[in-house]
Amino acid sequence: MKSTEMIPVLVALTLLAGCGARQDADLKTVSTPAEAASQIERAFAGAPEETRHAAGVAAEALRRGEYEKAVVSLTTVRAATNVTLDQGMAVHNSTLQLEARLAAEIAAGNEAATRAYGLLKAMKGK
């Protein structure tokens, strides 16, 4: 089989393998800051103290709407070594939720959200 013929087969196998993936609530996309905070806390419960602390700070900042603090904490957690799949997904989902929240707040004229969004974009570039 030629390599170009293998691409559709590999895509199909990847999709099929994903269908059997665990349907754990820890990996689901979150729809509120509170869900994002809870997911981060669960994912990092067994992490080393420094990383677990940063995850806790991020979770609390998400709950309280402390956007700049949430950005910095999520960036710190994301940079941690030995991050598991669950932890990486929790950070990703929380970042997406934060971006959505920031967009809504920016549209409402929230200057703190505008600053936090700029900070988030700068930190994503690193």
Image: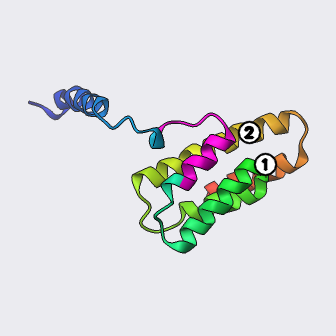
Where does the C terminus fall, quadrant-wise? bottom right
Q: Name the residue under label 2.
A: 101
Kindly identify which numbered label has been placed on residue 91.
none
Please say if 65 is above or below 53.
above
Question: Looking at the picture, how far across and down is residue 12, in whole percent?
Answer: 24, 26
Where residue 61 sits in the image (x, y, percent)?
Answer: 73, 55
**Is residue 104 something that shows in the picture?**
yes
**Residue at the spot 46% in from the left edge and 68% down from the top edge:** 81
Question: Label 1 neighbourhood size at 10 Å, few (<14), some (14-19), many (20+)?
Answer: some
Where is residue 36 drawn, in percent x and y? 61, 44
Residue at the disc numbered 1: 65
Q: Residue at x 47, y 43 (%)?
A: 26
Does residue 122 appear anywhere in the picture?
no
- Specify start and end residues of the magenta stretch as a single range: 28-41
Can you give x and y, in whole percent of width and height, for residue 10 in the image?
22, 32
In this rendering, would 18 be left or right of 93?
Answer: left
Is 36 a magenta residue?
Answer: yes
**Which mark is first along the chain, 1 or 2?**
1
Q: Which residue is drawn at 48% across and 53% down?
A: 88
Above or below, comparing residue 110 to residue 47 in the picture: above
33 and 74: which is toward the camera? 33
> Are the residues tagged 2 and 1 within 8 Å (C-beta)?
yes
Front disc: 2 or 1: 1
State which quarter of the image contains the N terminus.
top left
Q: Which one is in front, 1 or 27?
A: 27
